[in-house]
Amino acid sequence: MPALPALLLSIHFVLLLLTTAPSCHSQATVLSSVRMAAILDDQSVCGRGERHALALARENINSVMEGPSRARVEVDIFELQRDSQYETTDTMCQILPKGVVSVIGPASSPGLQLNCQSHMRGEGGEEPIPHIKIGPEETPRLPYLRFASVSLYPSNEDLSLAVGAILRSFGYPSTSLVCAKAECLLRLEELVRRFLISRETLSIRMLDDSLDPTPLLKEIRDDKVATIIIDANRLRLLPHPQKGFRVGDDISVLQVHPHHHGLPPSQVR
């Protein structure tokens, strides 16, 4: 789970700040728990993975932070059933009075907490609490950048470097990049540039989500492409076996789109 190391680091960092910083009062106050909130808005397999990552992070940190002077981490999870600014703001208004030290998520709406935080600060004079972004890096939204101090998703450059490292471990096989939108070429710009200045083979194919992908897959198979890099949202690229077509056991598939929800193992051969 790629987001887990950054999640562990971010929670651990907040915990260390709160439990080791000297108190400004004459008598130090020992915290028994540090409460955080997480807003999850992904109902798919990835959403369940985020929930498991949070639970594992909490257990790992609590297992190493022992002793009477160390606080335990507690994470309250709130789920959004639909993409609604009203629902997100209402959820934030429920979270902030609970005294949480930071808010993780939601993935698709990193800036929607602003209105509620401004309202709370105006009434109680409180400072905004840290917000940890778990959404992918796409087109930067300049007004929202300052509200997301930590991103749990890799940058576009890191993604290109990671895919390049995988291809290097494969011995730089013939590769085809399948894109549903032209913006994928910008997202993987570093990867494409590395291929252009080398002798390795990279073909780029555009896929219309409204069309049957079988002809494109047959074309890739006939060209004896060894690796397919898929950059498409919820792409049903690999047909079911009952359609009479399999990509082949000798083809590796790398899914790199940030909103990918996984392919059933029965579809990957």
Image: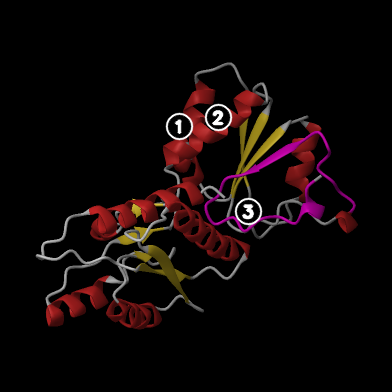
Q: Which residue, given by chain and number where applicable, does mark 1 sit on?
A: 190
- Under circle 3, the secondary element is loop
Label 1–label 2 contact, CB within 8 A: yes
- Under circle 1, the secondary element is helix
**Foreground residue among 266 and 66:** 66
**Foreground residue among 5 and 262:** 5
Residue positioned 64% across, 25% down in the render: 169
Q: Which residue, given by chain and number where applicable, does mark 2 sit on?
A: 164
Q: Amino acid at mark 3?
A: Asp
How far separated are the C-alphas under marks 3 and 2? 25 Å
Give me the disc on residue 208: 3
- Residue 75 vs 234, above or below: the answer is below
Residue positioned 47% across, 60% down in the render: 58
Residue 145 appearing in the image: no
The reply, left or right, for residue 129 in relation to residue 36 is: left
Q: Main secondary structure of the magenta part?
A: loop
For disc 1, the neighbor class at 10 Å (few under 14, some 14 to 19, many from 20) is some
Q: Amino acid at mark 2?
A: Gly
Report the span colored magenta: 244-268
Residue positioned 73% across, 44% down in the render: 216
The mark that comes first in sequence, 1 or 2, is 2
Q: Amino acid at mark 1?
A: Glu
Residue 172 percent coordinates (x, y): 64, 23
